[in-house]
């Protein structure tokens, strides 16, 4: 199980998280920015290749399906929190970060429930765009002041703009997932409700009938 290449890549993504965090907090800029960005890039690359190789090598496993989404959410949450900690995300920019983080928690809960009732929640094309923009934005923010300017915008400003864009798509995709989840929850509740009890015959009317018959 652990020796399968896709699972090893997923575990490597989790291992890269504390290295990224420690680098950004305890090393001096600009070296810290680029080392953290390197670990983040490697983690993002493994996110693509673990799923691709699992399908290509026919090494899909229950362990991989369990660990892969956890690794993704650990990476996103850790990067957002450390960026807030080093003041790369501050002020009103905390809002899109909070939206993204809350959406991750919401989707995790919905997926856990739907897995119990054996209902899958497919990833939409819009959700894939959200993930792509979010990954790029976090990469720009990790580099931050150490990066070059892109015309009138700094590396940090591009990251902030990307974060707002990802948060906007997060609201849309999160609402879609929530609607699907609520429909499934309602369907499960309707199935679990006991059938209405048949109306019992009135004892008095039965007695009356017996008397009349006698």
Image: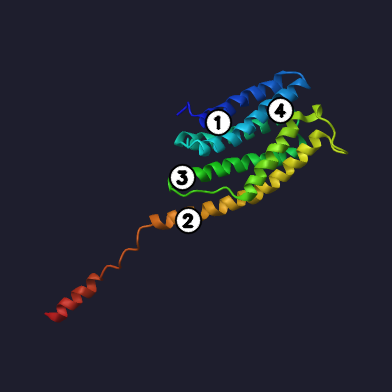
Q: Which residue is drawn at 52% across and 38% down?
A: 56
At which x and y percent is residue 126? 64, 50
Residue drawn at x 68%, y 37% is: 135
Residue 186 numbered tag: 2
Q: Which residue bears the numbered disc 4?
A: 37
Query: Would you call the spot at circle 1 few (<14 residues within 10 Å), some (14-19), or many (20 or more)?
Result: many
Q: Secondary structure beneath disc 2?
A: helix
Residue 69 x, y percent position in the rendering: 55, 37
Helix, strand, or loop for circle 4?
helix
Which numbered disc, 1 or 2, marks the residue that appears first in the sequence?
1
- Left-right relation of 89 to 21: right
Dot 1 or dot 4, earlier in sequence: 1
Q: Residue furthest left?
A: 214
Q: Nearer the viewer, mark 2 or mark 4?
A: 4
- Contact between marks 3 and 2 (CB within 8 A): the answer is no
Question: Which is more N-terminal, label 2 or label 3?
Answer: 3
Location of residue 10 (image quadrant): top right
- Describe residue 148's horizontal placement relative to residue 64 as left or right: right
Say which element carries label 1. helix
Camera-side residue: 32 or 196?
32
Residue position for label 1:
10
Q: Are marks 1 and 2 in contact (CB under 8 Å)?
A: no
The numbered disc on residue 184 is: none
User: What is the spatial separation of the Cα atoms under label 1 and label 3, in whole angstroms?
Assistant: 21 Å
N-terminal of the pair, mark 1 or mark 3, is 1
């Amino acid at each position: 199980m652990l020796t399968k290449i896709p699972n090893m890549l997923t575990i490597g993504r989790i291992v890269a998280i504390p290295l990224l965090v420690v680098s950004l907090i305890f090393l001096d800029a600009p070296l810290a920015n680029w080392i953290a960005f390197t670990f983040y890039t490697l983690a993002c690359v493994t996110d693509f290749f673990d799923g691709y190789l699992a399908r290509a090598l026919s090494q899909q496993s229950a362990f991989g399906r369990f660990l892969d989404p956890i690794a993704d959410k650990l990476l996103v949450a850790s990067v957002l929190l450390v960026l807030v900690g080093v003041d790369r995300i501050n002020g009103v920019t905390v809002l899109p970060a909070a939206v993204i983080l809350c959406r991750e928690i919401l989707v995790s809960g919905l997926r856990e429930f739907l897995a119990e009732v054996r209902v899958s929640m497919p990833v939409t094309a819009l959700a894939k765009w959200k993930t792509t923009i979010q990954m790029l934005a976090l990469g720009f923010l990790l580099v931050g002041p150490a990066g070059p300017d892109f015309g009138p915008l700094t590396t940090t400003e591009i990251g902030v703009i990307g974060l707002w864009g990802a948060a906007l798509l997060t609201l849309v995709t999160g609402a879609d997932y929530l609607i699907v989840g609520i429909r499934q929850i309602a369907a499960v509740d309707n199935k679990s409700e006991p059938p209405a009890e048949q109306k019992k015959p009135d004892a008095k009317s039965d007695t009356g009938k017996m008397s009349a018959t006698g």
